[in-house]
Image: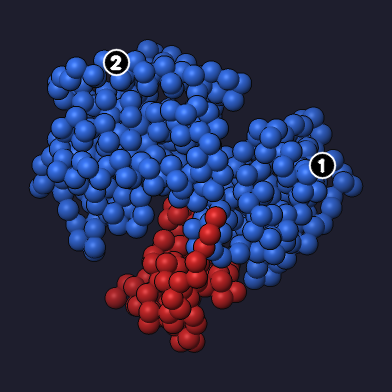
Chain colours: A red, B blue
Amino acid sequence: MEMKPTEIISFYFNGVTLEGRVGDTIASALHAAGIMVLSKSIHHHRPRGFYCAIGNCSSCHMTVNGVANVKTCITPLKAGMQVVYQDGKGVLR
Amino acid sequence: MIHTQAIVIGGGPAGLCAAYQLASHGVHTILFERNTMLGGQLIKQTHKFFGSEKQYAKTRGFDIAKKLITDLEPLQDKLTIHKNATVLGIYPDKVVTVMKDEQYFKYQAEVILVATGAMEKVLAFENNDLPGIYGAGAVQTLMNVYGVYPGKKIVMVGSGNIGLIVSYQLMQAGVEVLAVIEAQNTIGGYKVHASKLRRLGVPILTQKTVMKAMGTEVLEAIQIVSLDEKWNPIPYTEEIIACDALCISVGLSPMHQLLSMTNIKMKYIPELGGNVPLASETNETSVPGLFVCGDAYGIEEASSAIVEGYLTGLFAIQKLGLSSSDLHGLIQDYEHQLQNLRSGPFGKKTRIGMDKIKEARNAF
């Protein structure tokens, strides 16, 4: 099986510029950059990473471009995205 | 409200094959897939399939997905495919609500085929929510779809086929699999997969389970323990293994949530992985015109989902009252194929599960 490297794109995680690749999801790009903690749980504020990677389990929710509870494991990464760590339920705007 | 003849929910092997039969028999069909890609979990399966030629044996999973998708291309005048479209609800009057591009749509069809697939089960142990603990399928997705390493040192929990295959793929990708842990006293999956792992020096430890995970922000180590014949932990057999990822491969359960919205008759059947509809011999649920196929109707392999998808598409065509000279022959052929797939020792659970469905349906 062959995996050709795709074009590098940059995005922001908590305001810091990171690089991902075209074809990445937000979570896969973060994981490749060594970031595994995506959010904190609602009641006990325990660290959360992703679990299922196919959009089922809701463990990967983050705030993306101001929208809370985005399933980052299935949302394609786009250049310039503002990805923010989410503590608890997130805020509706 | 948008009206059509048939709606298929899910673009995995079952859904694609159901849509193929419907559209190639002239039925106006709309398929909804919530992901950006069609093919379901086939797209991450790099191993070659077993079985017979008819179910694409000796072909790699992602190549099967390509084949099934290509088969649909000539049917474009009958089949509309919506990707990135999440079905939010099914109603008994066969209305389906959909979210696509942040917009809400309503559809109504004469027949609906639910092929939502399955989700991975979790295992209960202390700190099982630490980042670094993943479903085995998630690791496979990360590695084979996105080309990202899930970790450097991994422990796999569960020695079923998924656990064994994913462990082997991890080793191929250069990730160290420290051990495969199995609570039962025998390896769950095919011996051929287990042998490949053993040849690479990966220990498969039976009668052991995970007691707890350790780590502050992310996984740093796990504690495993030996189990006696009654699955009780044996004192003083605890061992600590340092690892940065733990894969949970303890089976799948059907994605029943959409079906459960309709008040159809359902039952928890452990042999099939969880809640399944009490559907008829033609895969029709207790709501007339609402069909189910694939893993949503009991956990099996992708080969079975393919055949059941084709078959359920044909049953739905019959329900619509359409006649075609080849219908009867095709149904017989696929029924026969499905029977073959379920005939071996690994099909035992499905056979028991299907008998339980029949029994429960008659009891209603």
Which image quarter holds the C terminus of chain B? top left
Residue occupying image coordinates x 60% and y 74%:
A34
**Is residue B105 among the parts visible in the rendering?**
yes
Q: Residue furthest bottom?
A: A16
Q: Nearer the viewer, mark 2 or mark 1?
A: 2
**Subunit under mark 2:** B
Count of numbered badges drawn on the protein: 2
> Residue under circle 2?
B329
Residue occupying image coordinates x 56% and y 65%:
B148
Tag 2's secondary structure? Answer: helix
Tag 1's secondary structure? Answer: strand
Q: Quadrant of residue B223?
A: bottom right
**Would you place residue B144 above or below residue B66 in this image?**
below
**Would you place residue B55 above or below residue B152 in this image?**
above
Q: What's the residue type where badge 1 is placed?
A: Ser
Percent x, y of residue B74: 22, 42
Residue occupying image coordinates x 36% and y 41%:
B68
> Residue under circle 1?
B226
In this view, the residue in front, B127 or B39, is: B39
Left or right for B16, reference B203: left
Residue occupying image coordinates x 33% and y 45%:
B69
Percent x, y of residue A82: 39, 80
